[in-house]
């Protein structure tokens, strides 16, 4: 046993050290920097006194807060839509595909594994002024002029992101459905429950932890998105993440960018905690 | 699953009439259509991505192999993915063995820490690491991208390896130690081989996470771009698109293959 205790140190310390250094420490650093008063590039050797000026500026800038609200809303819409659309996919795989479940699952894994940028690029192609949809519409003579509402809008960002996330959302829902004991459904049927009643009262509640996992797997990356909006959103589809990106690139206002990042982190964590409380995952999983 | 399905029909459980297979195939069609469209343009003679298609060619694929900067970016992505996946898998392995086999203070904290990167938006982690590397004066390079990717890949490696470790019979390790092996030898000669497919599956998953990642990488890149960074930078040059798409299609075939391998390996253990 002595050898084992020694091994524990060898096992537990490197993960603590690595994640402490490159995950916890940077988050502490960004919180600290968000309390610095500078409005331009920061010289870390300069003396400084903690101040709330960055947060105050965010609070006073209505457009920042509005953008945060819009981004949270967009992420809710994207995560909700992707989870809803993924639900029947998972249901089919778990309950109807039977012997061919693996075959159908593999078909789903291919769009899942296709590169994210490639998929966004595909939507640029489809929605653009000279893009596939427009040139196809003109080619078959349905429209004479290209429609320019398609690309560079908030809707384009939402469509592209829902598209990217559907296969990701299907997997946790499918995993949760696979764990449902078929005996519950048989028992309910024996007691006279019809198919819809069994679906709403057994399958839905028991698959809810998976659906919730799917929802947050989509929500968290989406709320911080800046790449997709910059490719298909244009100025109208600008998100909170683009604002942060600006402060660290063109504007080079790191302290302000840090405060905006910390606010996003807090909002995300609060939403996750609240959702876990409301749904009470422990009651559902046991 | 077939057994369960058969039992279910045996007791006569009725079904709703929702056409689920049609819904599924319809969704798949929707998911494949944009990818198929890209593929179409990667073999079309048009230099702009518009209809009508004037003819088919493999020239864009040939040009991929004549474009040094494109190949360099792809190579950089391989290096970063390799390093990040290896680091994340080592950490995930250490966490899963420590957590399943030992009781110690900080045990719950370790699992929490290993899962936490999953709930931090990538842009926040990206700018935090960007500030850290500037703060400690480490120049940004492929290594800093690999570090960032190793952090976001740890939850994936840990989830996959924890699931396998839970099902591993501890008696096998006890037996090896009763026969005089040290714990380290036991890990190397007993635990690692038993977890082999899961370790490989975790590694491949982490590799794919890194290979495709751009939001963190954009903040941590020095002069050398990874392929997604390169792609992102070139997207505004319309005439470059067909070659870029051809390269992306080639890489996609690679990642799809890896995903299918990881999926097979993960299924084999159950």
Image (cartoon, rainbow, N blue to C red):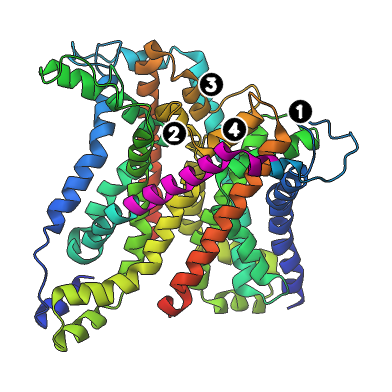
Marks 2/1: CA–CA distance: 27 Å
Q: Nearer the viewer, mark 3 or mark 2?
A: 2
Marks 1/4: CA–CA distance: 14 Å
Asked if both marks, 4 and 2, belong to the same chain, the answer given is yes
Please tell me which residue lies in front, A32 or B158: A32
Q: Is residue A253 above or below residue A223?
A: above
Please tell me which residue lies in front, B68 or A1: B68
Q: Secondary structure at mark 3?
A: helix
Q: Nearer the viewer, mark 1 or mark 3?
A: 1
Q: Is residue B167 above or below residue B158?
A: below
Marks 4/2: CA–CA distance: 13 Å
Name the image quarter holding the C terminus of chain A: bottom left
Please state the horizontal and vertical placement of residue A42, each as a whole percent of the image: 79, 31
Q: Quadrant of residue B254?
A: top left
User: Which chain is home to disc 3?
Assistant: B
Marks 1/3: CA–CA distance: 32 Å
Marks 4/3: CA–CA distance: 26 Å
Q: Is residue B215 above or below residue B230?
A: below
- As for residue A107 lying within the magenta part, the answer is no
Q: Which residue is labeled 1 in the image? A: A41
**Could you classify mark 1 by the number of other residues whose Cα lies within 10 Å: few (under 14), some (14-19), or many (20 or more)?**
few
Asked if both marks, 4 and 3, belong to the same chain, the answer given is no
Residue A228: give its label. 2
Q: Which SS type dominates the magenta stretch?
A: helix
Mark with earlier residue (1, 4):
1
- Who's the residue at 50% across and 53% down the image? B202
Q: Which residue is labeled 4 in the image? A: A245
User: Which chain is home to disc 2?
Assistant: A
Marks 1 and 3 in Cβ contact (< 8 Å): no
- As for residue A62 lying within the magenta part, the answer is yes
Q: Secondary structure at mark 1?
A: loop
Marks 3/2: CA–CA distance: 24 Å
């Amino acid at each position: 046993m002595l050898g084992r205790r020694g091994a524990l140190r060898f096992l537990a310390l490197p993960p603590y050290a690595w994640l402490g250094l490159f995950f916890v420490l940077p988050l502490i650093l960004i919180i600290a920097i968000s309390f610095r008063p500078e409005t331009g590039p920061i010289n870390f050797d300069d003396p400084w006194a903690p101040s709330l000026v960055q947060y105050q500026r965010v609070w006073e800038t209505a457009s920042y807060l509005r953008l945060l609200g819009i981004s949270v809303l967009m992420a809710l819409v994207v995560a909700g839509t992707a989870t809803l659309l993924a639900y029947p996919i998972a249901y089919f795989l778990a309950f109807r595909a039977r012997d061919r479940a693996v075959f159908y699952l593999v078909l789903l894994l291919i769009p899942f594994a296709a590169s994210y940028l490639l998929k966004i690029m595909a939507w640029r192609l489809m929605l653009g002024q000279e893009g596939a949809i427009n040139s196809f519409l003109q080619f078959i003579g349905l429209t004479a002029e290209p429609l320019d509402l398609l690309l560079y809008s908030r809707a384009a960002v939402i469509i592209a992101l829902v598209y990217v996330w559907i296969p990701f959302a299907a997997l946790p829902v499918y995993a949760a459905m696979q764990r449902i004991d078929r005996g519950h459904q048989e028992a309910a049927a024996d007691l006279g429950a019809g198919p819809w009643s069994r679906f709403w009262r057994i399958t839905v509640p028991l698959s809810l932890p998976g659906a919730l996992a799917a929802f947050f797997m989509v929500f968290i990356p989406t709320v911080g998105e800046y790449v997709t909006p910059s490719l298909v959103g244009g100025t109208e589809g600008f998100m909170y993440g683009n604002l942060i990106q600006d402060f660290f690139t063109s504007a080079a206002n790191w302290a302000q960018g840090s405060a905006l990042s910390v606010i996003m982190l807090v909002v995300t964590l609060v939403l996750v905690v609240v959702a876990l409380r409301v749904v009470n995952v422990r009651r559902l999983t046991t | 699953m077939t057994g369960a399905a058969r039992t279910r029909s045996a007791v006569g459980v009725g079904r709703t009439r929702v056409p689920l297979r049609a819904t599924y195939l319809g969704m798949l069609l929707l998911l494949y259509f944009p990818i198929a469209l890209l593929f179409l343009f990667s073999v079309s003679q048009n230099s702009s991505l518009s209809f009508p298609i004037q003819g088919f060619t493999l020239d864009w694929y040939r040009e991929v192999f004549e474009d040094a900067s494109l190949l360099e970016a792809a190579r950089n992505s391989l290096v970063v993915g390799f390093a990040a996946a290896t680091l994340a898998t080592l950490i995930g392995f250490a966490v899963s063995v420590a957590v399943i086999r030992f009781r110690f203070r900080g045990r719950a904290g370790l699992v929490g820490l290993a899962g936490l990167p999953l709930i931090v938006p990538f842009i926040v982690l990206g700018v935090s690491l960007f500030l850290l590397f500037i703060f400690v004066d480490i120049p940004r390079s492929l290594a800093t991208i690999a570090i960032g990717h190793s952090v976001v890949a740890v939850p994936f490696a840990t989830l996959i390896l924890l699931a396998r470790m839970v099902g591993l019979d501890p008696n096998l390790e006890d037996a090896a130690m009763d026969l005089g092996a040290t714990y380290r030898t036991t890990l190397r000669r007993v635990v690692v081989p038993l977890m082999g497919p899961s370790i490989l599956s975790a590694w491949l998953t982490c590799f794919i996470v890194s290979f495709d990642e751009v939001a963190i990488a954009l903040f941590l890149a020095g002069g050398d771009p990874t392929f997604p960074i390169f792609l992102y930078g070139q997207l505004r040059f319309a005439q470059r698109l067909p070659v870029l798409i051809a390269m992306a299609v080639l890489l996609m075939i690679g990642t799809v293959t890896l995903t299918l391998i990881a999926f097979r390996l993960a299924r084999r253990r159950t």
